[in-house]
Image: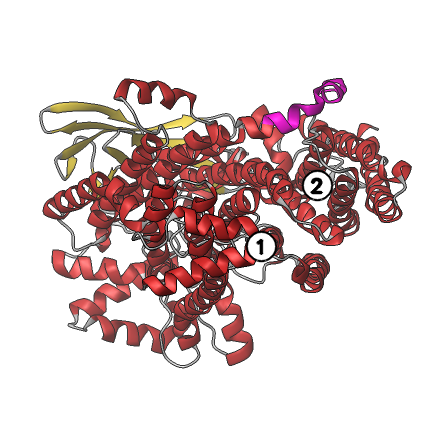
């Protein structure tokens, strides 16, 4: 087994960015690193050339630095690489053409879902027949037979507990009508 | 011999699952109690049979039985015992066996823990669970049989992928599967409810603990995977938006949405149809994840078993179960009328917003993951969708979620007042702004991630404390402090999990924004400086491990005038598998990790050495642990135990697994 070792060591990949690749100019080096993070190592499964240990990734890193030293702008470096390797090399997909669908998807999905949620929530909003409406609350207060309480609820002294209470003691609808009428008068 | 027994047990488990998937369903339909009653013993039996099968395979691995193809491909006699055992699931066939083991375990657990389920409902749910099992037993037996023998066994095996020979990754798959597969229970409950045509508060209460359990296992599984990537891959990344990571993240997001919407069903009997749909989708995305991992249609760093034939099988399983469940949903969902009412400003609305953000963000991850496939098939463009897209498209959802979370957790059910919640939350907002401002002032980079992460983190953690305090009601501080300890566990779980989210967001923001790195070729005795840290290379040694050879560097590290200590990053080579791995030297700290990696000898002499300062790295996983802990505390809430304890006696009679 031991004979295999040198072989394996020879084949062992290097560490991502190597000391000898680093540019002397820190600004250029930083640009190179930022660009590298957005470029795919083509022979790896899903790694950027900044992370990858593969030989091709090293070649690409050196290429990026070469172009930067030659005075290319970031966009020119990317164009150069896309021209050579296709858009597969870009980890950040372009926004043109069909990719507009990809970039538009988050907002479109959110709007769609948001519209659905809004409709759902608005349909769940309390309506008169669900729960206690103001009318019913007034009636409840009246039934509790506290003059001050019901007066407070409906507001003002026009509807006093006794008057409403009398109406509702007879039958329901009449009571509602009485309160409604009273409120109309009041407002 | 034992191996054949395991094989036979697997076939018998299939037979058992077929019985469990059919008879109880018919029984529930016709109202035959005897047929329904078959479900529970069948679920137990099925689990025991798969357990035997799994034990047989484990035995073959431990005993290094090289007449088994799987053992030859994934084991070696020199491998430490721990990794012989974990090697069982470190491959496609064995991991599928673990998959069905957990599937059967959940089914059996639903049979054991009573929870006051209706007999018809339990029969149907267990039948659906078994139907999923049938599909996977057939898949294993016909395409991925772990018990395939070799005619001429070799003398030794080809060793397990060295990357998998690591404690972090050894236990990453079981937790992940407990999560993935655990969601099958929510799926079975949803389909059973659709068949029965009845969803009520009780259904919400039954489905929630299973979802909570699956979610917390998934949280632990994902965190383990991320932690492993951090210390093992050699440059301290923690999340790569790799398709396979996304495959586990999408169900996690759906499960998170589901466990929130199930609360609404339980407390308010609203969001019923949506919750059913979420339960179906959560498991559906687990299946999609399985497809992504095992079919090889999408390239990923997780090379598993890239076999189109298997991919087709999983696609068929996916189509049958998702298609069937969604068709059933379309047919029955209309019957689930919600009578509950609530105002725009209410807990219900906030949870709808939570669900909207979680579900849409999950779909965004899905779109990004499958886009390369779509673009190639539909537009003939071969392109990549990498971290830059996901960072840009996903982060806003997290930010929005974190901003509204505290309001939602403080708003009362039915009808609330935003200004009242806002009034309670002002200390949190004040602190969040202060922390974000401080972070901004200290910010050296150009990134917004640091201040935003710090602000949101403070906002969530303080708001969780305020939420808990608000639950104690009114009165004197001492009395409220006393009540704090008597709050329901669910309240504590909620606060802990929400605070955990804040801690994770802070960790991610801080690490993304403030990482520092230095790389140099060092000869022995030379040193490099990163930030205020100086690392001196004292020695490089060759060390022999049980089944690898390592190059170990000794770095003497000082920070200012303080001695940090010695760090020993390693580079290992596994001769049998012919693969190198890096073992980073990490000095863990609360405010920062020091992270050192040793590379190759350099042409000009010396060794390539890299040292990083990773601020607040551990907070990322600390937050995940808090989230999982919150889930666990919530799971122990009295309302689940009361329901489960109604018939404690029969459960005690069931033998422990």
Counting from the top left corner in percent of width and height, residue B513 is at: 22, 48
What is the magenta range? B641-657
Mark 1 to mark 2 CA distance (whole Å): 39 Å
Quadrant for residue B79, please give it. top right
To which chain does the residue with label 2 belong?
B
Counting from the top left corner in percent of width and height, residue B259 is at: 52, 44
Counting from the top left corner in percent of width and height, residue B500 is at: 37, 36
Determine which residue is flagged by label 2.
Answer: B100
Identify the residue at image location x=29%, y=60%: A36
Q: Nearer the viewer, residue A8 or B165?
A: B165
To which chain does the residue with label 1 belong?
B
Determine which residue is flagged by label 1.
Answer: B339
State which mark lies toward you, 1 or 2.
Answer: 1
Q: Nearer the viewer, residue B88 or A166?
A: A166
Marks 1 and 2 in Cβ contact (< 8 Å) = no
Q: How is the image coloured?
A: secondary structure
Q: Secondary structure at mark 2?
A: helix
Q: Answer above or below: position of B24 versus B278.
A: above
Q: Nearer the viewer, residue B268 or B250?
A: B268
Judge left or right: residue A75 versus residue B307. Answer: left
Asked if the magenta segment contains residue B651, the reply would be yes
- Give the numbered dot on residue B551: none
Q: Answer above or below: position of B177 versus A185.
A: above
Q: Residues within 10 Å of mark 2 (few under 14, many from 20)?
A: many
Judge left or right: residue A73 versus residue B162. Answer: left
Of mark 1 and mark 2, the one earlier in the sequence is 2
Q: Nearer the viewer, residue B91 or B465?
A: B465
Q: Quadrant of the N terminus of chain B?
A: top right
Identify the residue at image location x=18%, y=31%: B536
Judge left or right: residue B380 versus residue A59. Answer: right
Q: Secondary structure at mark 1?
A: loop
Asked if the magenta segment contains residue B579, the reply would be no
């Amino acid at each position: 087994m031991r004979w295999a070792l040198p072989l394996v060591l020879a084949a062992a990949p290097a560490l991502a960015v190597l000391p000898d690749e680093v540019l002397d100019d820190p600004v250029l080096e930083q640009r190179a690193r930022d660009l590298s993070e957005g470029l795919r190592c083509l022979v790896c499964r899903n790694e950027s050339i900044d992370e990858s240990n593969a030989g091709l990734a090293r070649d690409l890193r050196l290429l990026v630095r070469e172009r930067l030293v030659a005075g290319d702008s970031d966009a020119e470096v990317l164009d150069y690489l896309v021209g050579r390797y296709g858009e597969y090399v870009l980890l950040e997909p372009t926004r043109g053409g069909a990719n507009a669908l990809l970039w538009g998807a988050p907002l479109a999905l959110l709007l769609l879902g948001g519209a659905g949620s809004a409709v759902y929530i608005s349909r769940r909003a309390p309506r008169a027949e669900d729960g206690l409406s103001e009318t019913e609350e007034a009636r409840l207060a009246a039934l509790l037979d506290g003059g001050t309480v019901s007066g407070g609820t409906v507001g003002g002294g026009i509807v006093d507990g006794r008057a409403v209470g009398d109406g509702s003691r007879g039958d329901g609808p009449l009571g509602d009508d009485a309160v409604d009428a009273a409120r109309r008068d009041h407002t | 011999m034992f191996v054949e027994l395991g094989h036979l047990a697997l076939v018998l488990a299939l037979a058992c699952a077929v019985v469990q998937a059919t008879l109880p369903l018919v029984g529930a339909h016709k109202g035959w109690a005897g047929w329904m009653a078959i479900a529970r013993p069948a679920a137990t039996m099925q689990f025991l049979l798969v357990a035997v099968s799994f034990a047989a395979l484990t035995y073959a691995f431990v005993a290094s039985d090289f007449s088994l193809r799987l053992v030859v491909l994934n084991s070696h006699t020199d491998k430490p015992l721990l990794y012989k055992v974990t090697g069982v699931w470190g491959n496609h066939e064995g991991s599928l066996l673990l998959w069905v083991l957990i599937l059967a375990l959940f089914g059996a657990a639903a049979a054991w823990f009573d929870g006051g389920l209706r007999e018809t409902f339990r029969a149907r749910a267990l039948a659906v669970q078994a139907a999923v099992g049938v599909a996977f037993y057939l898949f294993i037996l016909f395409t991925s049989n772990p018990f395939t023998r070799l005619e001429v066994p070799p003398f030794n095996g080809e060793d397990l992928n060295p990357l998998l020979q690591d404690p972090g990754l050894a236990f990453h798959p079981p937790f992940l599967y407990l999560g993935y597969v655990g969601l099958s229970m929510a799926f079975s409950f949803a389909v059973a409810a659709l068949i029965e045509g009845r969803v009520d508060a009780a259904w919400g209460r039954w489905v929630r603990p299973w979802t909570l359990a699956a979610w917390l296992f998934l949280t632990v599984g994902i965190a383990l995977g991320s932690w492993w990537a951090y210390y093992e891959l050699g440059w301290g990344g923690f999340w790569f938006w790799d398709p396979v990571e996304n495959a586990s993240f999408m169900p996690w997001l759906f499960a998170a949405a589901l466990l929130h919407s199930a609360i609404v069903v339980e407390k308010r009997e609203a969001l019923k149809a949506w919750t059913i749909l979420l339960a179906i989708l959560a498991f559906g995305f687990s299946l999609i994840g399985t497809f992504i991992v095992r079919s090889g249609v999408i390239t990923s760093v997780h090379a598993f078993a890239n076999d189109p034939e298997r991919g087709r099988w999983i696609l068929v399983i996916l189509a049958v179960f998702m298609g069937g469940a969604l068709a059933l949903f379309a047919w029955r969902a209309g019957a689930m009328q919600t009578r509950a009412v609530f105002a725009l400003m209410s807990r219900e609305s906030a949870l709808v917003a939570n669900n909207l953000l979680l579900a849409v963000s999950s779909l965004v991850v899905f779109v990004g993951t499958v886009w390369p496939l779509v673009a190639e098939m539909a537009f003939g463009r071969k392109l990549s969708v990498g971290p830059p897209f996901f960072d840009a498209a996903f982060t806003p959802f997290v930010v929005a979620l974190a901003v509204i979370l505290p309001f939602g957790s403080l708003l009362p059910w039915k009808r609330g007042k935003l200004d009242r919640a806002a009034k309670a939350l002002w200390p949190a907002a004040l602190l969040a702004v202060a922390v974000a401002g401080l972070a901004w002032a200290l910010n050296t980079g150009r990134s917004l991630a640091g201040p935003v992460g710090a602000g949101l983190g403070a906002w969530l953690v303080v708001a969780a404390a305020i939420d808990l305090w608000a639950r104690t009601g009114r009165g004197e501080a001492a009395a409220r402090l006393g009540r704090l300890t008597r709050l329901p566990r669910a309240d504590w779980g909620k606060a802990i999990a929400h605070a955990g989210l804040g801690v994770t967001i802070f960790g991610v923001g801080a690490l993304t924004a403030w990482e520092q790195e230095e790389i140099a070729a060092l000869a022995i005795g030379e040193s490099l400086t990163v930030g205020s840290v100086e690392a001196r290379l004292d020695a490089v040694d060759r060390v022999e491990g049980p089944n690898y050879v390592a190059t170990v560097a000794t770095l003497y590290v000082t920070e200012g005038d303080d001695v940090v200590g010695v760090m020993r990053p390693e580079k290992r080579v596994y001769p049998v598998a012919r693969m190198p791995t890096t073992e980073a030297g990490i000095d863990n700290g609360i405010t920062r990790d020091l992270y050192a990696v040793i590379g190759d000898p350099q042409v000009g002499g010396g060794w390539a050495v890299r040292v990083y300062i990773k601020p607040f790295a551990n907070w990322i996983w600390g937050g995940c642990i808090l989230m999982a802990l919150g889930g666990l505390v919530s799971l122990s809430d009295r309302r689940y135990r009361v329901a489960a304890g109604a018939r404690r006696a029969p459960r005690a009679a069931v033998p422990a697994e």
